[in-house]
Image (cartoon, rainbow, N blue to C red):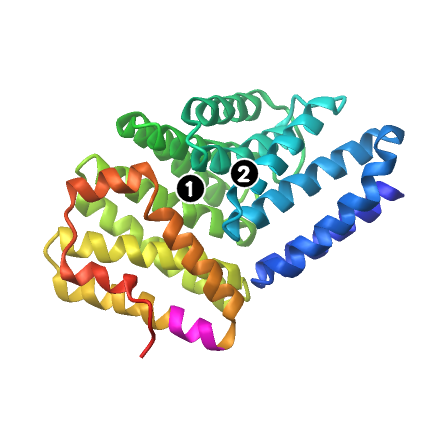
Amino acid sequence: MAARFIDSLGVHSDMLQVAGHVKKATALIKDAIAIAEPFIADSNDLVEALADSFSDISLCLHMSGQYEDALAKSEKSVELGHRHTSPNHTWFASMLNMQCAPLVKAGRFADTVAAGEKAVSLCRTSTSEYLFAPVRLPLALECLSNCVAEAGDEDKALGIIQEAVNLYQDIQSKNTVPWAFVEDDHAYALVSLSARLAANGHLQDAFEHTLEAKSIYKLTITSGMLVSYLPLMTTLHLLSILFCAVGHHTEGAAAADDLVNKKCDLEVVHPELAMLVQVRLNNQNTRPSYLALRRKIPQCACDLNHLKDSCK
């Protein structure tokens, strides 16, 4: 019963997060952890529920820019995952995936690649009949690609993310999983593919995939997934860079202005989401892979507008 109650709190926190209410989601997960921890020795199901809670709060903290706390919580999640009696499946892979971004932020690139590789290995060998199990391999591959890129191997990272995108396309064509539940993850993989293509000099292909991802995010936002504003903004940022890189400076300036205008609108109607957007942009702009890309594609006036602090 306790594990089910903790899981229900997790579902509620997920709904809050999707709506951009990460502070409320974080508070709810803290309550779940406080309830579960005293009884952790009583139930294997409770260990799993608690591991999920630590993974969820790690994501919320990372989204809010509390990177050290996010890493500590993700490490706790993985520790609990190891204690679970059946860690060798895609559920544990999701714990490892959640650890990767905080590890990157901490500069622990070898550790993040190792975690990403372990997650991919678990997903490849899994025989799970869980409905969404087929999605966890492309998710793990997308995560590993990012880890490898941040560690400096863009060529290898490109091959990994291309496999992830191919798997999403296979899921869509075969209707393996209801596509509405996968579309946002597919868009995220397309943006990762775009970044890897750009880093390897394939600018036109990168540009086209970024446009596709932008269209998907606009649809998911319209359907009520407000948290999609976060990847949409970083997608617009990348799009402004790529427009300028292929010589379309007017369109590049328009993409940058679109980013600024949307962020300013959010500051009025959803201040917390606007704050999360700025955290996301700041994080992206300091990632090693992004800094390396900017050395290959110099900034121009068109794609600098997103850095403006004030709204008109």
- Which element is circle 2 on? helix
User: Left or right of 86: which side holds 134?
Assistant: left
Please state which amino acid type lies under the numbered disc 1: Gln
Where, by quadrant of the figure, is residue 306 drawn? Answer: bottom left
Q: Position of residue 137 (x, y in %)?
A: 51, 32
Let me know if residue 298 appears in the view.
yes
Where, by quadrant of the figure, is residue 290 drawn? Answer: top left
- Which element is circle 1 on? helix
In the image, residue 19 above or below residue 173: below
Q: Nearer the viewer, residue 201 or 164?
A: 201
Where, by quadrant of the figure, is residue 240 drawn? Answer: bottom left
User: Left or right of 163: which side holds 275?
Assistant: right
Furthest-bottom residue in this view: 312
Q: Position of residue 158 (x, y in %)?
A: 31, 32
Q: Which residue is mark 2?
A: 135
Dot 1 surroundings within 10 Å: few (below 14), some, or many (20 or more)? few
Please state which amino acid type lies under the numbered disc 2: Val
User: Disc count in the image?
Assistant: 2
Q: Nearer the viewer, residue 265 or 159?
A: 265
Q: Which residue is mark 1?
A: 169
Extent of the magenta region: 263-268
Q: Position of residue 241 (x, y in %)?
A: 21, 53
Quadrant of the rendering where the N terminus is positioned = top right
Dot 2 surroundings within 10 Å: few (below 14), some, or many (20 or more)? many
Mark 1 or 2: the one toward you:
2
Quadrant of the rendering where the C terminus is positioned = bottom left
